[in-house]
């Protein structure tokens, strides 16, 4: 097991814990004996890494803030999975330098203490040992294994303190990932500060909407909200009290945080074109209603119309809605120049991109727009939109945000942007933003879904054990060539093949009017490749 290579994924480490009781028996002195030892081993080393980052003079993300943070979560993954996300002082995920150092640290199998001493200069450890200077915020979602993992994490922090100097850490308990990221960015130690801030900004936006859209329908009906039996499940009163101010009644489903997180519910479940179990059980009553599903740690969301086969407004639709709302606000705005950056990943439906370009063409010439495709993962989107006055980024999975970096915008846009969590994607604030945009544009969800007709697509996954990752990557260029041969002659068809950054699998994306057959052929070819790798 010592040769087992551990990879830092899209936003951190992920792993499966079949029996949380095994965590209690793990001893850091034994290292990795079998696969059950991997999760506690990774978490323990991450605790050490947090102590290193806290004591380092290297600015985590070019911020003078003294807070950093971490959340124990596997986001949208099944309830038996868990993982860890780590945040720099600006509330963003840790930067590339610390990502690389963290992966090296977790994979070190030699004399570990000597490894730490050898890297002291690279880590640029500060001389001051003021334990109040740096604060580590610790949070988790409500998975069964979470509380025990936090204990292991803290034991790693204690070890790191012995080597690098004291730090202060605060266990914030169960908390939404985006809430903790906000608390890190603004140096807050009580998650209620997040809700108070969002509530105040929401009230300002509501007042503005009522003043500027007096002819719009402010009776917005009922919104069905699925909280995925996750981190936000105990905070539903906040959305209930907020949305009623916009004339929106709410009904909440999958709110029992003692039940398994993401189990037959949540945004990822809906993306597979299935209704959450509790909504499906009431489909005769709820058919046709506007619905939204969060994921387990509440950093992404998906809208849809309840039906036997739900009509889905994914992250691409949310992005287009926000852009259309902003374009409407800016259509008659006189300014010297504004720059708008819009970032999507390669999973984004090409029809959504065409819709965005149509909006670009109708904007005043003093507004300069740029569209950017990035690799998958919100960290790549974030890096792509630096330097724009207005930035909108969204993944198809419903993870995204609006960022306004200038005061030179109309009040409507200023108030709208203030409810966005600029630290990271946030189900709660983005739900409010979607509802505000629908109201400002006076649109129903049916009208929203008519923005464009998506090209049919299939996103599937094929299991691949982590020990074969490097073998697969070596063969990927050859696999892509075979894929190009399969797709030759198929107009407006494309595919993507990539290793998942969060799970032990290969993701296969096919976008085509003939996606079912092309996906079948592509998957068959990849399965044969995997079989050959495993045989070797």
Image: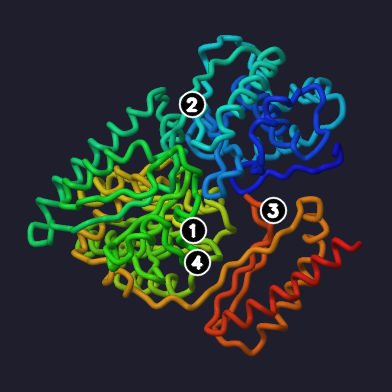
* Badge 2 density bin: few <14, some 14–19, many ≥20, Cα 10 Å: few
Q: Which residue is mark 1?
A: 269
Q: Are marks 2 and 4 in contact (CB under 8 Å)?
A: no
Residue 368 in sight here: no
* Badge 3 density bin: few <14, some 14–19, many ≥20, Cα 10 Å: many
Marked residue nearer the N-terminal end (3 or 4):
4
Q: Which residue is mark 2?
A: 64
Marked residue nearer the N-terminal end (3 or 1):
1
Q: Which residue is mark 3?
A: 504
Instruction: Measure the C-alpha gap from mark 2 to mark 4.
Output: 35 Å
**Number of the label disc, if any, that sits on residue 348:** 4
Of marks 3 and 1, the one in the foreground: 1
Which residue is rendered at x = 46% and y = 35% of the image? 181
Which residue is rendered at x = 68% and y = 61% of the image? 506
Residue 81 in sight here: yes
Residue 376, by quadrant, is bottom right
The x and y percentages for residue 111 are 86, 24
């Amino acid at each position: 097991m010592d040769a087992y290579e551990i990879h830092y994924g899209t936003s951190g480490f992920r792993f499966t814990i079949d029996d949380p009781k095994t965590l209690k028996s793990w001893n850091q002195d034994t290292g990795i004996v079998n696969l059950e030892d991997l999760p506690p081993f990774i978490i323990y080393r991450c605790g050490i890494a947090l102590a290193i980052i806290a004591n380092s003079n290297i600015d985590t993300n070019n911020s003078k803030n003294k807070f950093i943070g971490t959340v124990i979560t596997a986001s949208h993954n099944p309830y038996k999975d868990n993982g860890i996300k780590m945040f720099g002082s600006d509330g963003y995920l840790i930067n590339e330098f610390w990502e690389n150092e963290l992966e090296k640290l977790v994979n070190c199998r030699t004399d570990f203490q000597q490894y730490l001493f050898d890297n002291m200069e690279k880590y640029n450890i500060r001389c001051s040992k003021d334990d109040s200077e740096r604060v580590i915020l610790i949070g988790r979602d409500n998975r069964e294994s979470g509380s025990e993992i936090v204990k292991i994490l803290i034991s790693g922090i204690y070890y790191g303190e012995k080597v690098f100097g004291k730090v202060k850490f605060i266990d914030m308990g169960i908390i939404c990932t985006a809430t903790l990221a906000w608390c890190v960015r603004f140096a807050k130690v009580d998650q209620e500060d997040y809700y108070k801030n969002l509530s105040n900004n929401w009230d300002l936006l509501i007042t503005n909407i009522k003043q500027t859209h007096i002819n719009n329908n402010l009776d917005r009906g009922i919104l069905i909200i699925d909280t995925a039996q996750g981190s936000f499940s105990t905070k539903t009163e906040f959305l209930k009290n907020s949305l009623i101010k916009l004339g929106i009644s709410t009904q909440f489903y999958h709110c029992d945080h003692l039940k398994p997180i993401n189990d037959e519910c949540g945004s990822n479940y809906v993306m597979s074109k299935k209704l959450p179990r509790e909504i499906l059980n009431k489909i005769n009553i709820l058919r046709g209603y506007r619905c939204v599903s969060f994921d387990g740690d509440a950093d992404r969301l998906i809208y849809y119309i309840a039906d036997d086969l739900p009509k889905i407004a994914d992250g691409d639709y949310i992005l287009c809605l926000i852009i259309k709302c902003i374009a409407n606000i800016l259509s008659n705005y006189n300014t010297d120049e504004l720059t708008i950056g819009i970032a999507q990943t390669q999973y984004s439906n090409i029809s959504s991109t065409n819709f965005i370009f149509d909006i670009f063409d109708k904007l005043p010439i003093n507004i300069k727009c740029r569209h950017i495709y990035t690799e998958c993962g919100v960290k790549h989107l974030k890096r792509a939109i630096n330097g724009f006055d207005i930035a909108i980024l969204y993944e198809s999975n419903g993870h995204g945000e609006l960022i306004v970096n200038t005061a030179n915008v109309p009040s409507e846009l200023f108030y709208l942007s203030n409810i966005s969590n600029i630290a990271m994607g946030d189900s709660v604030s983005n739900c409010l933003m979607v509802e505000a945009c629908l109201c400002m544009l006076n649109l129903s969800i049916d009208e929203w879904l008519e923005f464009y007709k998506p090209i049919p697509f299939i996103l599937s996954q094929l299991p691949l054990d982590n020990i074969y990752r490097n073998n697969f990557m070596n063969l990927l260029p050859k696999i892509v060539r075979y894929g190009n041969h399969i797709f030759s002659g198929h107009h407006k068809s494309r595919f993507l093949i990539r290793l998942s950054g969060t799970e032990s699998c290969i993701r296969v994306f096919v976008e085509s009017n003939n996606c079912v057959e092309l996906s079948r052929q592509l998957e068959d070819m990849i399965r044969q490749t995997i079989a050959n790798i495993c045989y070797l």
